[in-house]
Image: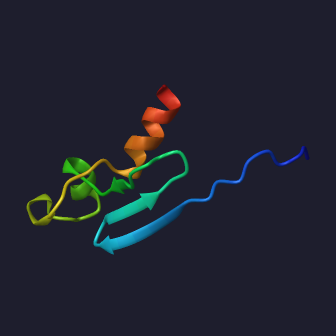
Amino acid sequence: MGKVVYISKSTIERKRGPLRIAHLPGEAQPVIYSVHGAIAEHYKVDPAKLSESHAATIDYVISATAG
């Protein structure tokens, strides 16, 4: 195994339901994660009851790997 070159120092705060706030290195502002549309329905979260709709973690993973 090679030398470790980076360890991410991230924290996640769960607010309520699927709403989470991530504090990530390199970002001046927190990143907000939640669910929306079909993702909310998949997890049986009524989209009408979401106080805030935001990108889900899978949206960030897909955009990071596609970029």
Give how far across and how far down residue 43 sits, in percent.
29, 62
Quadrant for residue 19, please give it. Answer: bottom left
- Specify the farthest residue to the top: 67
Q: How is the image coloured?
A: rainbow
Q: Residue furthest left?
A: 48
Of residue 65 and residue 39, the one placed in the foreground of this image is 65
Q: Is residue 28 above or below residue 40?
A: above
Viewer-closest of 52 and 42: 52
User: What residue lies at 56% left-to-right and 59% top-to-bottom?
Assistant: 10
Q: Residue 46: x percent and y percent?
A: 14, 64
The number of discs equals 0
For the point 73% across and 48% down, which residue is it? 6
Q: Is residue 54 left or right of residue 56?
A: left
Q: Position of residue 3 (x, y in %)?
A: 89, 46
Residue 32: percent from left, percent from top: 34, 55
Q: Residue furthest front?
A: 28
Determine the residue positioned at 47% across, 42% down.
61
Q: Which of 4 and 64 is in front in this view?
A: 4
Residue 63 lies in quadrant? top left
- Tell me if 59 is positioned left or right of 27 in this view: left
Q: Which residue is drawn at 8% across and 61% down?
A: 48
